[in-house]
């Protein structure tokens, strides 16, 4: 990780890990990986590794919190709203196109939890965001996203979407429960996959990014308001990845 992405407002650089494919950047998919409220964790890097290997892809892992000197955005509530995160996505997508030379028609945004929230907001048909993101991203993938909407600038509208969005939710998720999602937020997506028995973070890399996870093992978050369960599910993870695979392949082939 190093400061390398000029921030949207040009006041400093965002921390990121840029991993161009050894065979060259051109002609292949590119993924921007955005983290959840805990900041970057091993799961984000495990996901990045899977994307790189599965799609022979370029992968950018983006850090919105340490870029601002903060470790997390969950311990005592949500300090940062989602619009800030979208500005980071705009900055990263511009950098990938203009400086790294990726093909925006093959660029995807993937995020989990608050990162999934970022995906949903990035593709929501707000004139400002769609003007700024026009031509920069092909589609978005949201894993167990925060869906709270209360009409404020902190929790703004989610959907309808300006491009294809793939959403995954879990029926036992008590951190970002699917009940918080308005029906239109989910049904406006290109596809919505629900795993009834999955908790938040069913793809958790509970032994680190490079070591196979232990299926069925559960832990609890350190959130002072909600010590929600995080249980690894190999079955849900495999099903999720299979749908991501087909989703990306279908769009890249068009």
Image (cartoon, rainbow, N blue to C red):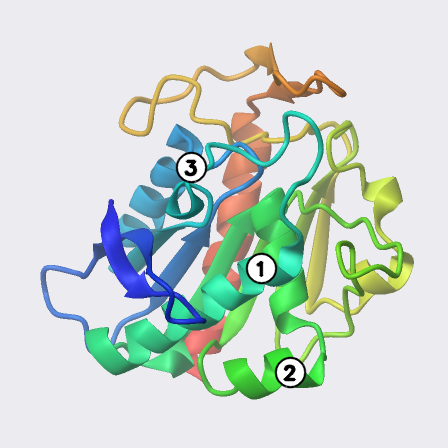
Is 159 situated left or right of 85 in this image? right
Name the one closer to the observer, 117 or 4. Answer: 4
Is 186 situated left or right of 80 in this image? right
For marks 1 and 3, the one nearer the N-term is 3
Marks 1 and 2 sit apart, C-alpha to C-alpha, by 13 Å
Name the residue at 38% across, 80% down.
104
For marks 1 and 2, the one nearer the N-term is 1
Q: Which residue is mark 3?
A: 40
Crowding near the residue tagged with mark 1, few <14, some 14–19, many ≥20 C-alpha atoms within 10 Å: few
On the image, which quarter does residue 6 sit in?
Answer: bottom left
Crowding near the residue tagged with mark 2, few <14, some 14–19, many ≥20 C-alpha atoms within 10 Å: few
Marks 3 and 2 sit apart, C-alpha to C-alpha, by 27 Å
Residue 201 seen anywhere in this rendered image of the structure: yes
| Badge 3 vs badge 2, beta-carbon distance below 8 Å | no
Query: x%, y% of residue 203?
Result: 52, 32
Name the residue at 69% across, 29% down.
198
Q: Which residue is mark 2?
A: 128
225 above or below 153? above
The dot on residue 84 is: 1
Query: x%, y% of residue 101?
Result: 22, 79
Crowding near the residue tagged with mark 3, few <14, some 14–19, many ≥20 C-alpha atoms within 10 Å: many
Is 238 situated left or right of 14 in this image? right
Query: x%, y% of residue 48?
Result: 34, 46
Disc 3 secondary structure class: loop
If the image is split into quadrants, where does the N terminus sit? top left
Query: x%, y% of residue 177?
Result: 80, 37
Name the one closer to the observer, 206 or 56. Answer: 206
Disc 2 secondary structure class: helix
Name the residue at 58% across, 88% down.
131
Is 27 situated left or right of 209 in this image? left
For marks 3 and 2, the one nearer the N-term is 3
166 above or below 38? below
């Amino acid at each position: 990780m190093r400061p390398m992405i000029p921030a949207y407002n040009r006041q400093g650089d965002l921390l990121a890990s840029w991993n161009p494919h050894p065979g060259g950047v051109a002609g292949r998919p590119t993924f921007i990986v955005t983290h959840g409220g805990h900041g970057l964790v091993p799961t984000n890097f495990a996901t990045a590794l899977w994307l790189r290997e599965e799609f022979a892809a370029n992968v950018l892992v983006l850090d919105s919190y340490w870029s601002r000197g903060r470790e997390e955005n969950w311990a005592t509530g949500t300090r940062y709203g989602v619009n800030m995160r979208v500005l980071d996505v705009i900055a990263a997508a511009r950098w990938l196109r203009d400086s790294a030379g990726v093909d925006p028609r093959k660029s995807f945004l993937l995020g989990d939890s608050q990162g999934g929230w970022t995906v949903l907001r990035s593709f929501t048909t707000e004139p400002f965001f769609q003007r700024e993101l026009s031509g920069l991203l092909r589609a978005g993938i949201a894993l167990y996203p925060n869906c709270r909407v209360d009409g404020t600038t902190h929790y703004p509208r989610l959907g309808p979407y300006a491009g294809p969005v793939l959403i995954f939710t879990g029926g036992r998720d008590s951190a970002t429960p699917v009940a918080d999602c308005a029906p239109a937020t989910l049904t406006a997506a290109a596809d919505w996959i629900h795993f009834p028995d999955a908790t938040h973070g069913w793809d958790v890399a509970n032994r680190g990014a490079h070591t196979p996870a232990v299926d069925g093992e559960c832990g609890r978050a350190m959130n002072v308001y909600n010590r929600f369960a995080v249980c690894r599910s190999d079955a849900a993870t495999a099903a999720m990845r299979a749908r991501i695979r087909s989703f990306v392949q279908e769009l890249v082939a068009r």
